[in-house]
Image (cartoon, rainbow, N blue to C red):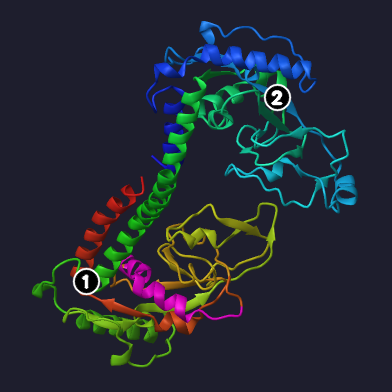
Amino acid sequence: MNAQDLKNSIIQLAIQGKLIEQREEEGTAKELLERIEAEKKQLIKEGKIKKEKKLPEVTQDEVLFDIPESWQWTRISNIADMYTGNSIPKTIKENKYSKVKEGYHYIGTKDVGFDYKIDYDNGIKIPYEEKKFRNSFKDSILMCIEGGSAGRKIGILDKTVCFGNKLCSFNLIFGEPRFLYYYLQSPIFFQAFRDEMTGIIGGVSITKLKSIVMPLPPLEEQKRIVAKIEELMPYVEKYDKAYSKVDELNKKFPEDMQKSILQYAIQGKLVEQREEDGVADELYQQIQEEKKRLIKEGKIKKIQVYSEITEEEIPFDIPRNWKWVRLIDILLVKPTNGYSPKGVNYETNIKNLTLTATTSGTFNKTAYKYVDIEIEDGSPYWLKHNDLLIQRSNSREYVGTSCIYNGEDNEFIYPDLMMRMRVHPLILLKYIDYALKAPFSRKYFKESATGTSESMPKINQNTVSNALIPLPPLEEQKRLLEKIEELLPYTKQLVK
């Protein structure tokens, strides 16, 4: 239950007569309605309100729920004088009424907030002597009755104002105005309001609004209900702050759990080490020998040798049988930037990925645009199944995001904002992808990104090539993957 649900529950209990006890000495709503009717006749006689056609009594079919015996179902117009305000063309508003120093504040729909507050300081005032504008008085309620905010923007006035034609003023004849104010915020009223909405823009006519039914308590009970609601609202606000914090933690917790799992994995803390697995250095040497053979056979090109890893670079301890390596040391070819010719709005034979294809960390094959160019079959721009992609430019949050390309060979090319890598087959590709997704690697790419634009910082080939990878023996890589893929689905369930 969020704070709005809690507030709705309190108001619902209040308008059902379940929030406080009833007291016999406070009389009945029937007596109150008789008093209101007498007040209304007097106001009509004095010319302060217009006489209107009497609406039919509330039928049993219209009753929404049981109420205490001392209460009574009535129609809103039986207790309040209701009418809309006056519209002002924008040019007239700006030219004639924006410089008025003394007058009534003019309240439009935009000045009534979803937070039930009214903004009087909009710079528009109507001179006191102008009689063509309708007033809404202190302690009256303004509610938007047309457009997207209809029934949801409500405020109670602390001064007399003029107001717009999309707002309805509820001027209580006699009673506690804040009881009506809270009733208009209730889910029951809002549903009744929505049921009466018509038109493309959406709105409720004054006639239909006047006919909506409401439960009415005796006056003294109204006052006690309002006092109890307003006693509870500060607690709702505290609950809202606490709920928001908990909600934020709940949303963040699964992500933090995923990060923790991957960080534990690359630190050698997720599964136990086994002596029979051997050591990563043997695997590393085997890879280097294999690469030398492939270079000698002309199957791959010689890659630049990067400096040895120094003690100062090592961020954390790893198991003895692991080895710190640079990413370039375990690639078959150096990281390669993609190609970004201009996209076209018609179908061609070449599909070029967009950043969205890799931003989530898993490959999205629907994120591409067509380009009208020729790409040779042996071009390095064609992606091969199990290529590793990394974003070389994006927001600082996403720069360096990696994913495994699981499409077909020569199905897509990739853009200049990505790099393509091919991991040596003696190493498990998924382990490297997870290592690049771990907090240590993410931090490295974020901090290494450069550029004048904070929204699109970049990493280059040297940054990616120099990235440190904690390398376990092959058999431990297999067990790590099994454990990671056993645990990660549980973190996704936490999101629900």
Looking at the image, which residue is at 37% across and 93% down? 307
Q: Is residue 202 visible?
A: no
Check disc 1 and report its element: helix, strand or loop: helix
Q: Nearer the viewer, residue 219 or 307?
A: 219
Q: Which residue bears the numbered disc 2?
A: 82
Q: Nearer the viewer, residue 193 or 442?
A: 193
Q: Is residue 16 left or right of residue 378?
A: left
Q: Which residue bears the numbered disc 1?
A: 474
Which contiguous range is marked in magenta? 429-452
- Amino acid on which the number 2 mark rests in the picture: Met
User: Percent x, y for residue 6?
Assistant: 41, 37
Q: Nearer the viewer, residue 279 or 149?
A: 149
Q: Nearer the viewer, mark 1 or mark 2?
A: 2
Tell me where residue 66 sits by quadrant.
top left
Mark 2 is surrounded, within 10 Å at the Cα level, by few (under 14), some (14 to 19) or many (20 or more) other residues, namely: many
User: Percent x, y for residue 126?
Assistant: 83, 43
Check disc 2 and report its element: helix, strand or loop: strand
Q: Is residue 444 left or right of residue 289?
A: right
- Amino acid on which the number 1 mark rests in the picture: Leu
